[in-house]
Image (cartoon, rainbow, N blue to C red):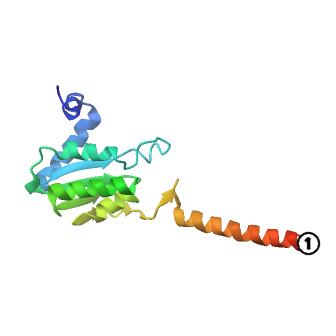
Amino acid sequence: MPSFNDVLKEIKSPIDAIRHKYLKRLHNKTKRNIICYYSGWLQNPNVRGIEISDVDKNGFMNAIHGLNRSKGLDIILHTPGGEVAATESIVDYIRQMFGTDVRAIVPQLSMSAGTMIACSCKSIVLGTHSNLGPVDPQFGGIPAQGVVEEFRRAIEEIKKTLAAFLSGKQL
């Protein structure tokens, strides 16, 4: 029975042909292994399951299987980030396979946990328009520290309001 990658190789699309052409050009210049990790998160921001998760480790294992480890690895990243534990597990696996001979290439954006992957590499290649995002925990794009600060401010306002009410002062 063929692997999932073998089936995907049989299903060609024009986009795949163009993508393959440019990845081959990059490989011919660098002579390195290349893995692309990207999603259409900017085009479809409300789609679930586009962030880094434990499931992605299987994808990395499948992509790395059979690669010549002596050639090093280039990871092309375009990601909104994701789970920290999953990211750490993926980075550990990549390091087991390639040591420190890993380079991140960020053509546009690598946010949060994607930035962590990039920073775990020996080097990072960025374009003039590329960005690495913050690595602070976020909830729905809002920094967790901001949520905590708002919560603390709300507590203080409630305390003041309650104290004023109990003392009979008008608000």
Residue extending furthest toward the top = 1
Residue extending furthest toward the front = 166
Q: Position of residue 82 (x, y in %)?
A: 40, 53
Total label count?
A: 1
**Disc 1 secondary structure class:** loop
Residue 134 shown left or right of residue 60 in the figure: right
Residue 122 shown left or right of residue 139 in the figure: left
| Frontmost residue, 120 versus 17 | 120
Task: Give the residue number, with chain letter if any, for mark 1.
Answer: 168
Above or below: residue 18 compared with residue 27: above
Residue located 23% across and 66% down the image: 123
Q: Position of residue 101 (x, y in %)?
A: 16, 62
* Residue 130 visible in the shown view: no
Above or below: residue 56 compared with residue 104: above
Above or below: residue 48 compared with residue 110: above
| Frontmost residue, 120 versus 18 | 120
Residue 57 shown left or right of residue 23 in the figure: right
| Frontmost residue, 132 versus 6 | 6
What quarter of the picture does the C terminus occupy?
Answer: bottom right
- Quadrant assignment, res 151: bottom right
Give amino acid for label 1: Gly
What quarter of the picture does the N terminus occupy?
Answer: top left
Residue located 24% across and 28% down the image: 11
- Answer few, some or many: residues within 10 Å of disc 1's Cα (few below 14, many 20 plus, some between 14 and 19): few
- Quadrant assignment, res 4: top left
Residue 49 shown left or right of residue 104 in the figure: right
* Residue 160 visible in the shown view: yes
